[in-house]
Image (cartoon, rainbow, N blue to C red):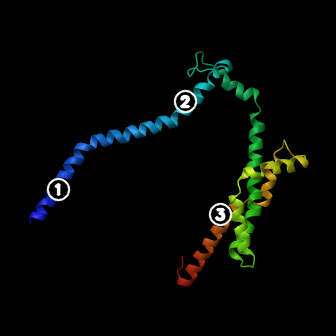
Amino acid sequence: MTAIASTGELRASVRARRRTHRPLLWIAEHAALVTVAVLMIAPVVFVVLTSLMSSNQALTASVVPSPVDWSNYARVFTELPLARWFGNSAMYAVLATVFMLLSSVPAAYALAQIEFRASGLIFTTIVVAMLLPPQVTAVPQYVMWSHLGLTGSLWPLILPNLLGDAFSVFLLRQFFFAQKAFVERITLTGVKG
């Protein structure tokens, strides 16, 4: 009986300690959250304040714009070709995605579903290609696009997607492989629905 009583007393003392330490824990948690919130919001506030400065004042150590210049926002839409930039971005995004899907999906599907002699070697090559940092191939790619006369256009960004991407093939192959295993498991167990 004394063991049960001492356990009950121990629980009561733990509860009492938690009640006394709760305000300190609450303050510590909220102080950490406020610090993180300030760190996240500070760059946005800095960018907005800088956008309201004149061009001479933006490069100084001043943080607060002394004459607030709202005309900066109007000049962005009147003096810069935003529609062309948006069109370039949309064209790149659409064509790169379509080319990537056209080249990566068949390759990944074949590696996951069809068993052939060199499939392991091809998959290993894809994994090794993922390990190659893009900085290694940057200069040779630039030289190649320069010889083809395509530098200064969007084509060097879009055309490599026609050949697929190692990461995309790897990710899609894993998905197809998992889907194949799932379907096999369902057909073996006879689960329907």
Q: Relative to 1, is 46 on the left or the right? A: right
Q: Nearer the viewer, mark 1 or mark 2?
A: 1
> Crowding at label 1, few (<14), some or many (≥20) Cα neighbours within 10 Å?
few
Q: Position of residue 49 (x, y in %)?
A: 58, 25
Q: Nearer the viewer, residue 112 or 189?
A: 112
> How far is the residue under mark 1 from the one under mark 2?
51 Å
> How far is the residue under mark 3 from the one under mark 1?
53 Å
Q: Position of residue 93 (x, y in %)?
A: 73, 49
Quadrant in the picture for residue 161: bottom right
| Secondary element at tag 2 | helix
Q: Amino acid at mark 2?
A: Val
> Crowding at label 3, few (<14), some or many (≥20) Cα neighbours within 10 Å?
some
Q: Is residue 108 visible?
A: no
Q: Nearer the viewer, residue 134 or 29?
A: 134
Residue beneath label 3, please? Answer: 171
Q: Is residue 13 above or below residue 26?
A: below
Residue beneath label 1, please? Answer: 10
Q: Amino acid at mark 3?
A: Leu
